[in-house]
Image (cartoon, rainbow, N blue to C red):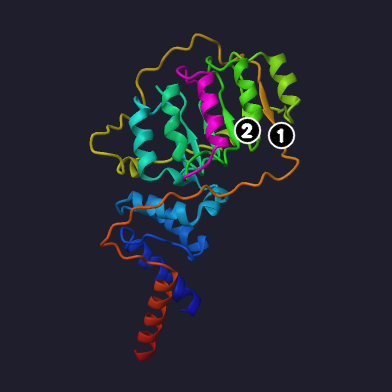
């Protein structure tokens, strides 16, 4: 076995067997070590702990956003009877690990939106067919995308989906125009006036987007297993699975004209990483950093040479 293989093997095996003790992965390569670690954690029978997800997101935020991993994309569309306790739990435990979030057809309300302020790596947010939110939600999201401080906010939000959300009206257009990092916006089936939206948004750099391929839409939120993440929630949270009752729509979703917009940012939007709030670290926990892993490698190689 080569020295490189030995180095990778030692680091990877140690990390996956000591996830509860690790408080930093700074200096550890995202590819292939951290990426393979994520895959192992969510697919193996090893109990998943939220602390390692938080560590990964703090040490590798940029890589996590660009990797487009299926494990950072959560789809709760129609699968949760009460979304508030779920979002609250994730917001407290591992919000920065999530890059895509689909929470349509739930009981989410305007006042619940501020739970998303801790999801600082969120890129795609989908509210399709949620009938409890209004223009206030758009106002709150805009505020969170523009005001990022103390490790909170939505500075990397790029895509928003409000399809068939009847509480969204022309009043939201001024907020969409303010979100400088937003590149894709879907408003089909809302109360937004087509002519008004086209005139206003195109004057702010948007253009009408052709329909996206169905495979592209489905691929953004793969049907992943939920049990690994549900295990991380409080004991009093009950995962109800797929709903057996659905609210009947009062409008036709099959013959709704498309109202989708996209834009290419003509100049780079300089985004600073949200400042990290001070973390409370357990006193008894040992801080394992890159030098620790190198020391373990040297020890292992020394043992091999003696053998």
- Side of 75 where 67 appears, left or right: right
Closest to the observer, 76 or 107: 107
Q: Residue at x 65, y 16 (%)?
A: 257
Q: Residue at x 34, y 21 (%)?
A: 244
Direction bottom: furthest residue = 306
Residue 2 in sight in this render:
no
Closest to the observer, 145 or 6: 145
Q: Secondary structure at mark 2?
A: loop
- Side of 184 where 71 appears, left or right: left
Q: Is 130 covered by the magenta stretch?
A: yes
Q: Quadrant of the C terminus?
A: bottom left
Question: Is residue 272 shown above or below 220?
Answer: below
State the image coordinates of residue 304 (x, y, percent, origin top left): 37, 85
Question: Which residue is tagged 2?
Answer: 179
Q: Is 267 covered by the magenta stretch?
A: no
Closest to the observer, 262 or 143: 143
Question: Is residue 44 shown above or below 197?
Answer: below
């Amino acid at each position: 076995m080569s020295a490189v293989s030995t180095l990778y093997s030692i680091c990877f095996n140690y990390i996956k067997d000591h996830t509860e003790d690790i408080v930093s992965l700074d200096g550890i390569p995202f590819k292939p070590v951290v990426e393979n670690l994520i895959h192992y954690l969510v697919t193996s029978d090893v109990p998943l702990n939220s602390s390692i997800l938080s560590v990964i997101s703090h040490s590798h935020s940029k890589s996590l956003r660009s990797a487009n991993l299926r494990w950072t994309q959560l789809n709760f569309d129609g699968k949760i009877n009460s979304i508030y306790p779920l979002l609250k739990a994730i917001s407290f435990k591992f919000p920065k690990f999530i890059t895509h979030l689909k929470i349509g057809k739930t009981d989410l309300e305007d006042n619940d939106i501020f739970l998303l302020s801790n999801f600082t790596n969120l890129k795609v947010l989908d509210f399709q067919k949620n009938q409890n939110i209004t223009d206030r939600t758009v106002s709150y999201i805009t505020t969170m995308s523009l005001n990022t401080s103390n490790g909170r906010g939505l500075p990397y939000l790029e895509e928003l989906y409000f399809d068939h959300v009847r509480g969204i009206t022309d009043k939201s257009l001024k907020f969409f125009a303010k979100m400088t990092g937003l590149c894709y916006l879907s408003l089909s089936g809302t109360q937004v006036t087509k002519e008004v939206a086209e005139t206003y948004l195109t004057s702010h750099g948007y253009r009408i987007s052709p329909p996206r391929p169905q495979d592209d839409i489905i691929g953004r939120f793969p049907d992943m297993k939920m049990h690994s993440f549900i295990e991380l929630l409080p004991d009093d949270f009950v995962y109800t699975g797929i709903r057996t009752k659905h609210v009947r729509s009062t409008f036709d979703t099959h013959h709704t004209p498309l109202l989708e917009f996209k834009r290419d940012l003509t100049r780079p939007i300089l985004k600073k990483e949200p400042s990290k709030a001070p973390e409370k670290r357990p006193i008894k926990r040992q801080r394992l950093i890159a030098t620790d892993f190198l020391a373990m490698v040297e020890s292992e190689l020394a043992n091999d040479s003696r053998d």
